[in-house]
Image (spheres, rainbow, N blue to C red):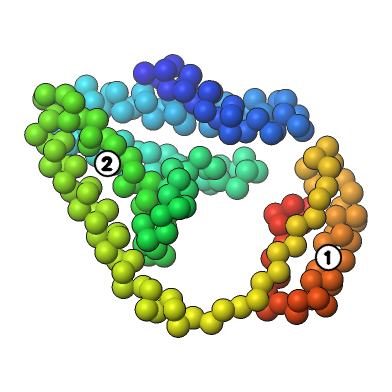
Amino acid sequence: AFFMGLGVGIITYSGWFYWLLTYKIWVFLVVLATFSSFMAVFCYWTKVVWQRKNPWLSILFPPFFWVTQQYIYDIIPTGLGGFWANLGYSQINHLKFLQVIALTGIPFITFLIIGLNSSICFTLLPYFRKTALKSVVVFLGLIGLVYGYSFFLPATMEKTKEIKTACIQANFYQDWQWRKTHVDEILATYTKLTRQAKKRFNPDFILWAEYAIP
C-alpha cells in the first residue's frame, strides 16, 4: 500500500510541479519526494485501519487523516505556500457549494469529498456495506446542508457595494532565479504599471501578482 501510494504520488505531483525543473532539478526532486510521501503515508495507514475490520473507523479514517495530514503539509516550510493539490480547489466552479468555507475553511470541503468517496468505496465490500450505506446518507445530508446554507446568502451579497479593481500583471523571464535577481527591475515595472492604472482607471483596489514581491 505504501509503495503503490508512492507511485501514484510521483505520477500525480510530477505533473503538478514540473515547472520547478525550470529552476533547479534538485528542488523538483525534494518537492516531489515531500508531496509523494503524503500519498504513500495516507495509503499505508488507511490499509492498516481497514484491516481492523471496524466499519465506521475504516470509513471515517480516510477523510479525517487526509485533512490532518494536509494541515501538517501546509505548515511545512517548502516555500510553495502550502499544499497545492487541495481537493477543495476542484469545486471552484460550484460557488454555492463553497460559501460555507467562510465558516469552516477549505479543509471542510476536502473532508466532504474524501468522506463521500470513502463511503461509496466501502459499499463494494460486503462486510462494510450496511454501515457504508448509512455513511453515504450522512455525507449526502451534510452536502445538502452546505448547499442549503448558500441560499441564505444571496440577499445579503446583492446589497454589497461594487468596487473598481485593477489587476497588475507584468511579464518576466522564468530564468530570473525565482525573484532573487532583477529585483529593482521587477519593482520598477510594477510601480510604473500601478501608476498607469491609477491614472487611467482610478480604481478603488489594486491587486499585484504573486511574483511582484521579490
Count residues near mark 1 (Cα–Cα under 10 Å), then give few for <14, some for 14-19, many for 20+: some
Amino acid at dot 2? Leu
Q: Please state the horizontal and vertical placement of residue 31, each as a whole percent of the image.
A: 61, 31
Whether residue 130 sits left or right of residue 18 in the image: it is left
Residue at 51% x, 40% y is 85
Picture quadrant where residue 114 is located: top left
Q: Residues within 10 Å of mark 2 (few under 14, many from 20)?
A: many
Q: Quadrant of residue 208?
A: bottom right
Q: Is residue 213 visible?
A: no
Tell me which label, 1 or 2, sits earlier in the chain.
2
- Number of the front mark, 1 or 2: 1
Closest to the observer, 9 or 167: 167
Q: Is residue 163 left or right of residue 92?
A: right
88, 67: nearer the viewer? 88
Asked which secondary structure carries label 2, the reply is helix
Residue 70: give x, y in percent of width and height.
45, 42
Element class at badge 1: helix
Q: Residue at x 11, y 24 (%)?
A: 126
> Residue 193 shows which numbered tag?
1
Whether residue 82 is visible to the viewer of this picture, yes or no, is yes
Q: Would residue 175 appear left or right of 152 to someone viewing this image?
A: right
Q: Disc 1 marks which amino acid? A: Leu
Q: Are marks 1 and 2 in contact (CB under 8 Å)?
A: no
* In-front residue for pair 89/183: 89
Above or below: residue 184 compared with residue 103: above
In the displayed structure, 72 sits above or below 123; it is below
- The residue wearing badge 2 is 116
Q: Is 129 or 63 nearer to us in this picture?
A: 129
In the rendered image, residue 132, in percent from the top left (x then y), is placed at 16, 36
